[in-house]
Amino acid sequence: MAEPEKKKSRRLCSFKDEWLQLPEYRNWLTKASEDSGYCSICRVQFTVKFDSVKAIKHHAETKGHRIKVQGQVWSSTSNKVSIKTDNAKEQHICTAELLLTYHGVKHHHSYRSQDCGNKLYHSIFPDSKIASKIHCGMTKAEALIETVLAPHSLKLAVQDIGSTPFSMATDASNKGNTVLFPVAVRYFNKDKGLCMSIIDFFEDADETSEAIANNLRNCLQNSGLIQNKIVAYGAVNFGENKSVFLHLKQMLDLPNLVPGYCSAHIVHNTAKHGLNMLSYDVEYLVIKVFSEFSSSAKNISELKEFFDFMETEYLEILHQAPKRFLTLFTAIDRLLKDWPALKSYFVNKGEEDVSRAIWAFLAEQEDTVSDDETVTLPELYIYFVHNIMSQFNNTIKVLESDYIQVTELYAIFNKLRREIQNRQEKGFYGYKVTQFLKKLPLNEQNKFVGDAQRAYTRMLQYLEKWFDFSENSFYKLCAPLNLDEPLQLDKLCALSTNLNIQVNIDELFTEMCVLNDVLPILKSSINDAESTQCQQQERHHQINVSEVWVELFKCCEAPNLLRIVQHVFAVPPSNAFVERVFSVMKNLWADERTRLQVDMVKAELFVHFNYKMTCAEFAGFLQTGVAKELVAAATNDQKFQLPRTSPCPV
């Protein structure tokens, strides 16, 4: 029997640098690794370890490579001709495509919708030579957003920041199983006032504080802002021992970094911790009542019958989202409006068919529904929570408004603290509670008062733990910059010392005196202008103190005061801007756009937030000389390159 023929062993080869100099390959061949090459035209990597230089020759002779080489030659030739012969017309077409793409991003249009619209323009505008030449389909729109508009918007934001001190803020949110982190910056521009932009948007499954801090440092390095003075870091939560804030202080050597707590979150948690001291869980009652009717058409129909019987209008039961600041009060407010009909409905069903959490508030109703002159002990807890939550709700509304600044936080929190202290000292729990509390048995009165007093105490303890009310706190020291009264030199000096800001005291005194002289006249003129605007628009408008400072700096040069103001106003009063980023992200990354990738979402967010212009204003911007670079980048395929992902035609 003959022995089987042995296979010839193949000698492994490595990539040789002299191949890069061969005239037939040098225009597209690069070395990818020790045993592989890379074609820059086809964007593919191939191995040479078995066939040596023959592998390169084989790739060069493939049909796909030859077609792309020929297309590249034709494209370069045609571009040269078109730019020379009809450059103006091409720029008009490119400007129109940029504007349409920008409009789509600002209003969260899908790429399929944009692609369909582009095919209609030549029919809608048959007499327009520009409209007939617009060809901005899904792929091109994606390229314009990701490689032209987004990088240009980031470039404008970084240029606008310049050497100005700024703060950075971030938070985490999930999209499916992807954890996303937007990085926002906040700074004060003496010509524009308060400005906020996005400089990064990344995904990272490692949610440790050290990993987040490393990502933030890389973000600053990539955007060229690592050398700027970073005055504060804003987030929702701060750990005491290991936190992003502490890691940033160490990594970036920022001993005077100010923590930018989310003030709205502090108020929300203050209420939540206080209400945990009550014997009756009103928040859980709201959740259980909503779940009773949220997915049952039969229950809703039966409830409406009770509304009709009591001759009241049916109002939809509202849901309380545990992590949403402004939902608990509105949900309880609606619950009280519906309470007579709800009581009748649940009492009619009986204890066996009603949740124990709900029946705990109805156990004393027995077989009848109490009239308007009787309020039971459990119902008093509902009225008490409704009353105290109205105070917290009003505070959160102020804190989440656009005009609020860090200089106003001390007054806002101190007002809330005094409100709670006064209620505790005077034993006030709301008019409705006061009216009916004395009608209850003494043991029930004592139980309610004890619970309410413990709730007040717990609220004050939490509030004073997470907000610094001391005389030397940053919030107390920066309050004079709110301009409620004339500036004082000793307070400005104390603030600059606390923040380690170098100022010339003699010059600072002169600047302060000049500003104090013009401040009353300036505030009067601003108030008159705002009053006229409110009358025209028929709405209330709160003056933004940063806008007052802009007008003051227009009146006179004040470099020492400017350094203090830039530092203080950069500190975020809350994390509301980052929350708005997540809201926009959810709008543009809807469930219908499942093929949208993170890099594309990042690019759209850059365009949405970093360009501060409406679509009409952006159209005017494209006609200015400042936008020549942007139009040229789109016209001549000169890209401010961002990392690319696969196309997302949605």
Image (tube, rainbow, N blue to C red):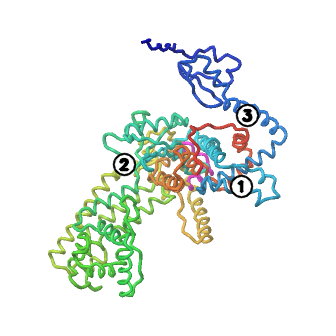
Whether residue 561 is in magenta: the answer is: yes
Which residue sits at x=41%, y=77%? 315
Q: Give the label on residue 630, or none.
A: none
Magenta region, residue range:
547-562
Q: At numbered mark 2, what does the secondary structure look like: helix, strand or loop?
A: loop
Say which residue label 2 marks: 237
Which residue sits at x=44%, y=44%? 233
Q: Give the label on residue 71, or none.
A: 3
- The image shows residue 272, relative to residue 82, as above or below, that is below
Would you say residue 277 is visible in this rendering?
Answer: yes
Does residue 432 appear left or right of residue 217 in this picture?
left
Mark 2 burial class by Cα count in 10 Å: few <14, some 14-19, many 20+ = some
The kind of residue on which mark 2 rests is: Asn
Q: CA distance from mark 3 to mark 2?
A: 55 Å
- Percent across and percent down for residue 632 are 72, 40
Q: CA distance from mark 1 to mark 2?
A: 49 Å
Say which residue label 1 marks: 119
